Image: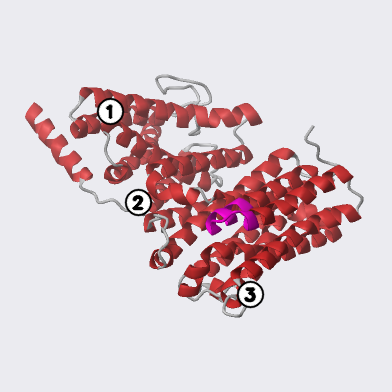
Amino acid sequence: MACLVIDLINRICGSLSRIPFSVYLLIFVPVVIAGGRAGQELLYFGMRPGFAPSSLPFLNYVVTYMLEQICVVAVFAIATGRNYREFVGVVSVGLLLAWLPPFLDGALLLVGIRQPHHMYVFFQEFSWHFFSDNQLIGESITLWISILAVAIYLAWRSRSVIRTLIGVSLYYALLQILGFLWPGCVIAISGNLSVESQMYMDLIGLALYGVVYFFLEFKTMFPSTLRLGHALPWGLLSAIGARLAGHDWWFVILYGIIFSVVVQMMVYANDYFDSAADSACGGKARPVTRDNLVFSLFFSGILALHVFWMDADRFYLVATFIALWHSYHLPSIRLKRVLGVSYLMEGASAALALLFGLGLEGLKGDPGLAFVCVCMAFSGFVIGSTMKDYKDIEQDRAAGVNTLYTRLTESTLTIGKIHAVISSLLTVALAIPAVYLFIVGESVGKLVLLGVLALLPQVCLLAIGSRRTAVQAAIWGVNAYLGVLVFILPNEFVRLF
């Protein structure tokens, strides 16, 4: 009998381990599991007398299983010391256990056993054994079945008692984190687990999901993550918009982070599409893979859907921004090859970012001011974005991308003269908000600070010899300028202290 059991385990575990890796398993499996589980719960709750099935926050299901899948994969990789890709298939199949609780509880209901609690909820109090008065028993039983399954698989795969114990311990801790600590933090802040608080819980979950994937793909993601400075200007513009609209600091930070993350996902995509051109011109292409590209698109889509959950009007802005950026660098479209269009797209992106922070609240509060600020953002980024092409003159020329640098260097003008003029344009662009603040009577100290920071990027561009380093330093100078602007904007409704 024991031999038959061992042979069965070998067959099942061996078959599951041979499932080839695909990044699409990280996308479609959580969505399918979430959809099936949501449908099961609606059917189960509909079976209960006196309960009316209602709409459930489906995105919360999706994020929950996304996070559970990738975290279990990470646990297996840590416990066995193997590449995480070996475990995506088996964990994807293991997620099917999420469909078991409604079957168990439905069977109990059919035989006349009606449990006093009627909802599947996150654990709102710590329970080391996973059984709770406010949790349906099917969920608790399934969690212990999953622990047993993890122990059997890790023992088969690692052939090590120590590694198996490490993996099971990590998995148990993961269940407590996702089942109790993750929602517990939200409950501690908001006081309950309402639909609105679940939305913020999802945003925390998405952040954790992105962090885990980043560390699993550290070698391919890290070089492009160092380009975070390219994403921050748009996030800071969103934060500025939220400040102008009179939001409290929580929303100022939230909107800024959301837009920065959306742009950073576009940075990964841009690095992937530019890798061939960078290599062809003797540069060092960033190692973003096609899988990373797929991940970034999926992550952007899920985040955009959460923006829709928060505010439909802001979703339209994010969706337009994503479409605009992909039109900018997709090989089949690649609008950045057209001289002038790329700069206009930068300005339009800046306007969208500022409008994202403003929202309808800002437009209703003072539409005249909103119009002026959006025009300043648009014109400032149209003018200031030209300096970024300084680092890629040879690559752009070889790839047929038309920029001011590639066009003007075909004339009698030297790169030095061209660069001096374009870097001065950046200073002019940064001076636009300072001029406006001077007109409205802002204090001299704030204007002096902005003036110094407005000059800093040009100093970096002219003083640093390496083109790439000079542009990177200038971008961080722009971020410093916008970051200070977030705090010194005149606003009668929002104060930091």
Q: Secondary structure at mark 1?
A: helix
Tell me how many marks there are: 3
Quadrant in the picture for residue 404: bottom right
Q: Is residue 403 magenta?
A: no
Left/right placement of residue 68 relative to residue 385 reads left
Mark 3 neighbour density, 10 Å: few (under 14) some (14–19) many (20 or more): some
Magenta residues span: 461-474
Mark 1: which amino acid? Answer: Leu
Where is mark 1, residue-wise?
A: 148
Mark 2: which amino acid? Answer: Leu
Left/right placement of residue 129 relative to residue 11 reads right
Q: Position of residue 328 (x, y in %)?
A: 55, 68
Q: Position of residue 101 (x, y in %)?
A: 38, 35
For the point 59% across and 32% down, the residue is 186
Where is mark 2, residue-wise?
A: 25
Q: Is residue 473 magenta?
A: yes
User: Which quadrant is home to the C terminus?
Assistant: top right
Q: Of the numbered discs in the image, which one, if any, rests on residue 7?
A: none
Q: Is residue 359 above or below residue 116?
A: below
For the point 9% across and 32% down, the residue is 4
Mark 2 neighbour density, 10 Å: few (under 14) some (14–19) many (20 or more): some
For the point 51% across and 54% down, the residue is 265
Q: Of the numbered discs in the image, which one, if any, rests on residue 340?
A: 3
Q: Judge whether residue 339 can be spotted in this image.
A: yes
Q: Secondary structure at mark 3?
A: loop
The tag earlier along the polypeptide, 1 or 2, is 2
